[in-house]
Image (cartoon, rainbow, N blue to C red):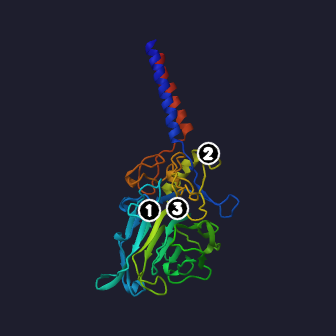
């Protein structure tokens, strides 16, 4: 009897452990991330995400979501009196001391990633070059999506900040800010769609270029640039407010691409101006990208995890992407709120461990990146990989219980 009692206690503890483990693998957002209201013509659901919180990065070499670029263009190719060169040394992380206290970086100032354009030129092969920085996303399978960046421009005139989706010179969704077009009362946004039916980086078709005046100084505090690309429209936003939209779908890109962030100068007075009179730093605090993947493996992973929960009809199977309203706030943090209150920080699904909101996504802890395990569960892997199995808690619980009844209980009954 004592032995039987010990087996019964063991079974009870096993069942308790199984139920507890089931609760830990519960997940949300298996059927994607939505933008706009369901009644909006531009309502869309995206399958994949890329979230980078630049206020936490200590060593950018550890961030496998982004690929820093190193290249050179001589003055003739750069279309200016100076050549352009990108260098790793122009990418300067300034992680926060403690975001739960304030947004101060370990080197002072606001935490984030600085892309530097030094005031002094550099001589390369006997010619003058201005150094800048470029980051390209490792994911190049983005087709449709909403793309957002937290930024603060430099106070020095003479540089160009670009944030854009890119396939080639004829398939590009572009946002560029010239620091010479920023003053105490306004900032100009240069918005352009380079199309597969004509136009290029050197010219834009009528209706594919817009200069929008924003009534603020973008070098004074953090702001958010955003553009959405859906099957029906390409729309630009600033701090959550719609700025411009294009609905002529014949102009839209037709192939997948990647994200690019640049900060540069070539001294051309017709565009970037410069060189800057001081060391010009563009501050980045985050990138949030929610998009559909053109990769067959990622498409298959999405179908498996969404079908496992019975499709997209149900609570928390599709997660609404929080809309930024006003400039992102970095108050005395509570860790993961929507960035508008004094005690809020910008929201990241990858920080929402309570919901397990990035199940089967390529999201990694801190500096581990491609060597790490996915926060959402499943085996680790490189960019664009997914878990090999997707079990829902109910199914997993059922399998485990049958194992108990078919294997363990007969053993007890034979005692």
From the viewer's perspective, is the residue at label 3 or at label 2 nearer? 3
Which residue occupies 44% across, 86% down?
268
Q: Residues within 10 Å of mark 1 (few under 14, many from 20)?
A: many
User: x and y percent of residue 307 in the render?
Assistant: 58, 47
- Residue 114: horizontal and vertical position, in percent? 42, 68
**Disc 3: CA contacts within 10 A as few (<14), some (14-19) or many (>=20):** many
The residue at 49%/69% (across/down) is: 152
Q: Is residue 261 above or below residue 414?
A: below
Q: Residue at the top extreme?
A: 1
Residue at mark 2 to residue at mark 1: CA–CA distance: 42 Å
Q: Are marks 2 and 1 in contact (CB under 8 Å)?
A: no
Q: Position of residue 50 (x, y in %)?
A: 49, 59
* Numbered circle sitting on residue 289: 3
Q: How many marks?
A: 3
Q: CA distance from mark 3 to mark 2?
A: 26 Å
56 and 362: which is toward the camera: 56
Tell me which label, 3 or 2, sits earlier in the chain. 3
Residue furthest to the left: 125
Query: Residue 410, relative to residue 285: is it above or below?
Result: above
Q: Is residue 179 left or right of residue 227?
A: left
Which residue is found at the position 56% from the left and 53% from the top? 337
Mark nearer the viewer, 3 or 1 = 1
Mark 3, secondary structure of its residue: strand
Q: Which residue is mark 1?
A: 111
Quarter of the image where the C terminus is located: top left
Residue at label 2?
Answer: 310
Q: Residue at x 64, y 74 (%)?
A: 248
Mark 2: which secondary structure?
Answer: loop
């Amino acid at each position: 009897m004592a032995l039987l009692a010990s087996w019964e206690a063991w079974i009870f503890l096993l069942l308790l452990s199984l139920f507890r483990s089931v609760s830990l693998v519960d997940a949300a957002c298996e059927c994607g991330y939505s933008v706009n209201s369901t009644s909006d013509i531009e309502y869309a659901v995206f399958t994949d995400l890329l979230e980078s919180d630049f206020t936490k990065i200590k060593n950018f070499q550890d961030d496998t979501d982004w690929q820093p670029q190193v290249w050179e263009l001589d003055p003739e190719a750069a279309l200016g009196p100076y050549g352009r060169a990108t260098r790793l040394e122009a990418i300067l992380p300034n992680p926060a001391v403690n975001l739960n206290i304030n947004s101060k970086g370990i080197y002072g100032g606001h935490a984030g990633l600085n892309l530097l354009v030094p005031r002094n030129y550099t001589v390369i092969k006997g010619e003058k070059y201005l150094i800048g920085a470029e980051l390209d996303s490792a994911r190049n399978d983005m087709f449709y999506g909403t793309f957002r960046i937290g930024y603060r421009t430099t106070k020095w005139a003479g540089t160009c900040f670009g944030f854009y989706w890119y396939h080639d010179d004829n398939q590009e969704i572009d946002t560029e800010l010239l620091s010479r077009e920023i003053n105490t009362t306004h900032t100009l946004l240069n918005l352009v769609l380079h199309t597969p039916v004509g136009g290029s980086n050197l010219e834009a078709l009528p209706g594919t270029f817009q200069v929008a005046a924003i009534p603020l100084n973008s070098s004074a505090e953090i702001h958010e640039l955003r553009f959405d690309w859906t099957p029906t429209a390409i729309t630009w936003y600033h701090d959550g407010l719609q700025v411009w939209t294009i609905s002529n779908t014949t102009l839209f890109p037709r192939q997948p691409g990647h994200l690019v962030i640049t900060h540069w100068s070539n001294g051309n007075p017709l565009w970037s101006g410069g060189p800057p009179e001081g060391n010009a730093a563009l501050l980045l605090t985050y990138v949030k990208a929610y998009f559909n993947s053109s990769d067959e493996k990622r498409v298959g992973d999405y179908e498996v995890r969404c079908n496992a929960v019975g499709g997209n009809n149900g609570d928390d199977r599709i997660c609404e992407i929080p809309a930024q309203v006003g400039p992102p706030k970095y108050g005395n943090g509570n860790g993961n709120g929507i960035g508008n209150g004094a005690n809020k920080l910008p929201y990241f699904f990858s920080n929402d461990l309570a919901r397990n909101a990035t199940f089967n996504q390529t999201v990694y802890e801190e500096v581990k990146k491609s060597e790490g395990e996915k926060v959402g569960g499943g085996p680790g892997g490189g960019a664009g990989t997914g878990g090999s199995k997707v079990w829902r808690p109910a199914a997993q619980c059922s399998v485990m219980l049958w194992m108990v009844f078919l294997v363990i209980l007969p053993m007890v009954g034979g005692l």
